[in-house]
Image (cartoon, rainbow, N blue to C red):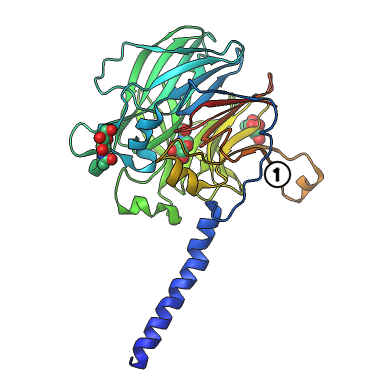
């Protein structure tokens, strides 16, 4: 072999090695390659509710202790989950539903939909449930709806996603459609934070585009995801772009803070909303594991579903929901300890971790700080999990 080729090949493989070690390996490590599951909080008083499967998002109604859940079927999720590039609309469920779960009685109520005439049905994902500012018994339900496209092949054009606003009353068995919000700024919606007026919300786009090659390499660090704001009277705008791997979004009630989860590199971006609905970057809270959906409890703690082994969750569990994926939950609180002086503003505690035999493929965790209950649920999970803390 002529020396120049040897040199060229050697350099090529050296470069490949360097790229692997310098770039890929940290990503794989972050995504759980070689990581051991370190169980915590999973041996106590936990129960499962297998009637509530594949409930991607759970929202606590704090005054009553009831849980609202956006549910589907594990089977449908394997075909149709636009957030993770599953775009076989032939296999999608159009009968996803919002359920209300009363942890005291274990009663499950599936909300019947009233006044929603679209033949394209509901294919649920992110959700928020917000008591109305004028009547606390009235609740607004904001739902991400991943509709199949009206024209074109779903694998090529992606989902035609909208946000649906419904209203319901605490204890009711129905929810009434208020409005469908569709807008060019709603590209790949993941999660929503609604206002108590039933008209306005913030949302995350979890990718930069519905389909395409760039979308597939966003995992390497491309900053193409965003946060948007919609007002049903005046439309939607992107209020922060060039973010990496946005996923769940949560707001503290009566507070201007928004928390956005990074599902690849981990960490929570803290944004402050302004009077004109723009947002400014306030902080970034790093976490060891990639995290998913975030929620804020009554005590102001931020709870995040985390993936000890994101590769198992994404590659195995989302394809074969019956095979378990390890799950974890983080609690983030303001650091009041002495090291707060040295710049550690937040304390991140790993409160729950399980190898998947109790809590599998968890993507959403919610804490009832009054009743000391932790709820865990997942995109394709076999059941809701409830633990006493
Ligand atoms: C899409 O879903 C349908 C219905 O479940 C299924 O029959 C078909 O095999 C799926 N296509 C692919 C490519 O997985
Ligand atoms: C909102 O709540 C968070 C956490 O509880 C706190 O850190 C932040 O300062 C609050 N912001 C405002 C504007 O009250
Ligand atoms: C709102 C919501 O539930 N968002 C994310 C939760 O976790 C799954 C798994 O990664 C994501 O696909 C969702 O987008």
Which quadrant holds residue 38? top right
* Residue 239 visible somewhere in the drawing: no
Q: Nearer the viewer, residue 327 or 371?
A: 327
In the displayed structure, 138 sits above or below 318; it is: above
Report the side of 152 relative to 320 (left or right): left
Q: Position of residue 77 (x, y in %)?
A: 38, 33
Can the viewer see residue 53?
yes
Counting from the top left corner in percent of width and height, residue 108 is at: 50, 13
Residue 279 lies left or right of residue 297; in this view the side is left
**Rendered-image quadrant of the C terminus:** top right
Residue at the extreme left: 151
**Spot occupied by residue 328 in the image (x, y as percentages of width and height):** 60, 39
Please state if 187 lies on the left or on the right of 171 as rendered: left
* Residue 88 spot, x, y in % from top left: 28, 37
Which element type, helix, strand or loop, lies under badge 1? loop
Task: Residue under label 1, please give it.
Answer: 345
Q: Is residue 87 left or right of residue 331?
A: left
The quadrant in which the N terminus is found is bottom left
Instruction: Residue at 59%, 53% (x, y): give it.
Output: 35
Q: Nearer the viewer, residue 92 or 146?
A: 92
Residue at (42% x, 41% y) in the render: 206
Q: Residue at x 24, y 38 (%)?
A: 154
Task: Please name whichever residue, 78 or 56, is drawn nearer the observer in this view of the structure.
Answer: 78
Q: Is residue 343 above or below residue 79?
A: below
Dividing the picture into quadrants, the one containing residue 16 is bottom left
């Amino acid at each position: 072999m002529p020396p120049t080729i040897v040199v060229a090949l050697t350099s090529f493989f050296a470069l490949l090695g360097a790229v692997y070690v310098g770039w890929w390996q940290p990503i794989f490590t972050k995504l759980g390659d070689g990581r051991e599951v370190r169980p915590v909080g999973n041996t106590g008083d936990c129960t499962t509710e297998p009637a509530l499967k594949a409930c991607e998002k759970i929202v606590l109604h704090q005054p009553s202790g009831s849980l609202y859940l956006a549910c589907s079927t594990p089977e449908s999720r394997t075909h149709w989950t636009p957030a993770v590039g599953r775009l076989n609309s032939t296999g999608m469920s159009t009968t996803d539903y919002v359920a209300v779960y009363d942890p005291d009685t274990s009663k499950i109520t599936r909300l019947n939909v009233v006044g929603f005439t679209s033949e394209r049905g509901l294919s649920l994902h992110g959700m928020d449930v917000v008591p109305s500012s004028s009547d606390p018994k009235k609740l607004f339900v904001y739902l991400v709806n991943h509709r199949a496209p009206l024209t074109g092949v779903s694998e090529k054009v992606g989902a035609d996603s909208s946000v649906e606003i419904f209203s319901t009353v605490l204890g009711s068995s129905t929810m009434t459609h208020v409005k469908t919000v569709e807008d060019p700024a709603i590209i790949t919606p993941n999660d929503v934070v609604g206002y108590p007026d039933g008209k306005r919300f913030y949302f995350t786009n979890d990718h930069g585009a519905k389909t395409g090659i760039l979308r597939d390499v966003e995992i390497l660090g491309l900053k193409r995801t965003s946060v948007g704001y919609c007002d049903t009277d005046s439309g939607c705008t992107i209020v922060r772009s060039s973010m990496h791997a946005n996923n769940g979004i949560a707001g503290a009630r009566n507070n201007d803070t928004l928390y956005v989860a990074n599902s690849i590199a981990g960490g929570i971006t803290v944004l402050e909303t302004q009077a004109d609905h723009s947002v400014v970057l306030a902080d970034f809270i790093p976490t060891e594991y990639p995290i998913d959906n975030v929620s804020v409890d009554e005590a102001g703690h931020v709870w995040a579903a985390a993936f000890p082994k994101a590769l198992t969750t994404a590659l195995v569990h989302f394809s074969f929901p019956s095979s378990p994926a390890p799950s974890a939950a983080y609690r983030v609180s303001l650091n009041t300890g002495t090291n707060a002086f040295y710049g550690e503003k937040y304390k991140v505690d790993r409160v729950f971790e399980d190898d998947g035999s109790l809590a599998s493929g968890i993507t959403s965790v919610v804490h009832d700080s009054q009743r000391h209950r932790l709820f865990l649920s997942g995109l394709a999970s076999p059941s809701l999990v409830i633990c006493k803390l």
